[in-house]
Image (cartoon, rainbow, N blue to C red):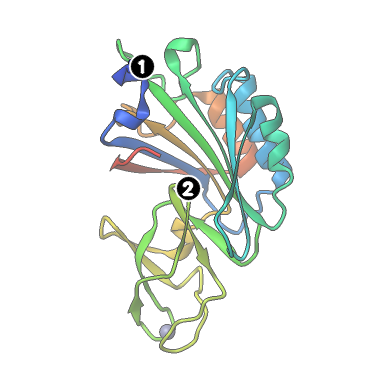
Amino acid sequence: MPLHRERVDPVRTPAQLELCHRRWLLPDDVQRAVVLPQAARLWRGLFDLAVLDPSAEALLDRLALPPAAAPEHSDLPAAASAGALLAGAGAASTVSQIVFLEEGRRDPYQEEGPEPGYRDYTLYLVDSTRFLLLPLPAVETICAACGRTAAPELTRFGEAALIDLARPCSACASPPDLTRTRARLRSGAIFLLEEVCARAALSIELPRAPREEELPDAQVAALLREAFGGYDELADDGVEPA
Ligand SMILES: [Zn+2]
């Protein structure tokens, strides 16, 4: 039997990292619409700025809503990935690509060092009035009407979760209220639902936390503002790689 040995380089292989850092960039107002063409322009803009690699493949995941089956997964040429987002009406979609900075990709966090490593970019878009994205999944929700605390029934989607705004409180049957229902995150912090939900988000996974708390790259920041309006950055450190 011939012995096949695959080349393994720990710096280049995200799967070998035990834990990584993920930044979530999301609109600062959950009520502000992010329509499919805006998301497609953002994704295309990341290629134009050389953040993404136009010669590599991208991955597309699409989940029809309400969720009844596993997401459909496809690999597609980078050039087709922005256009593929446009076909996500009534669905939750992600498009993603992993790039390596040593191959000349632009780093929005402008990290320095001998081992720049990888960046995993995933753009999430939920085209729905009923479902929203929870980038940092809540472990409990606190009903605004009756105060009952319950573990929310979320649908995992990529590294995030989807919350169904039509699912009522099991105690008093009130639906969640974005401006009054509270959510407790894994960290223990409690937020209003509207502060932690989004219709769209860009996640950037890095091997370790960047020095900068806010994206220092003005052109990438401008591209995000064009798609999202004002945006917030949420950090999730010590997480498993996607
Ligand atoms: Zn209730």
Instruction: Give the left or right position of residue 190, taking residue 160 as reference.
Output: left
Residue at left offset 58%, top offset 21%: 56
Mark closer to the observer (2, 1)? 1
Report the amino acid beneath label 1: His
Identify the residue at the far front of this view. Answer: 1
Q: With respect to residue 104, does 107 lie above or below?
A: below
From the top left corner, tell me how far across and down residue 32 is, in percent.
Answer: 63, 54
Residue at left offset 35%, top offset 82%: 148
Residue at left offset 50%, top offset 64%: 163
Instruction: Give the left or right position of residue 179, taking residue 50 as reference.
Output: left
- SS category of the residue bearing label 2: loop
Residue under pointer 2: 158
Report the amino acid beneath label 2: Gly
The reply to whether discs 2 and 1 touch (Cβ–Cβ < 8 Å) is no
Instruction: Give the left or right position of residue 237, taking residue 43 as reference.
Output: left
From the top left corner, tell me how far across and down residue 5 is, in percent.
Answer: 33, 16
From the top left corner, tell me how far across and down residue 176 is, in percent.
Answer: 50, 75
Instruction: Tell which of 189 and 22 is nearer to you.
Output: 22
Would residue 229 be seen by someone viewing this image from the given angle? no
Residue under pointer 1: 4
The 10 Å Cα crowd at callout 2, few under 14, some 14 to 19, many 20 or more, is: some
Q: Which mark is residue 123?
A: none
The 10 Å Cα crowd at callout 1, few under 14, some 14 to 19, many 20 or more, is: few
Identify the residue at the far bottom of this view. Answer: 172
Residue at left offset 51%, top offset 68%: 178
Would residue 163 be seen by someone viewing this image from the given angle? yes
Task: Point out the quarter of the image occupied by ligand 1.
Answer: bottom left
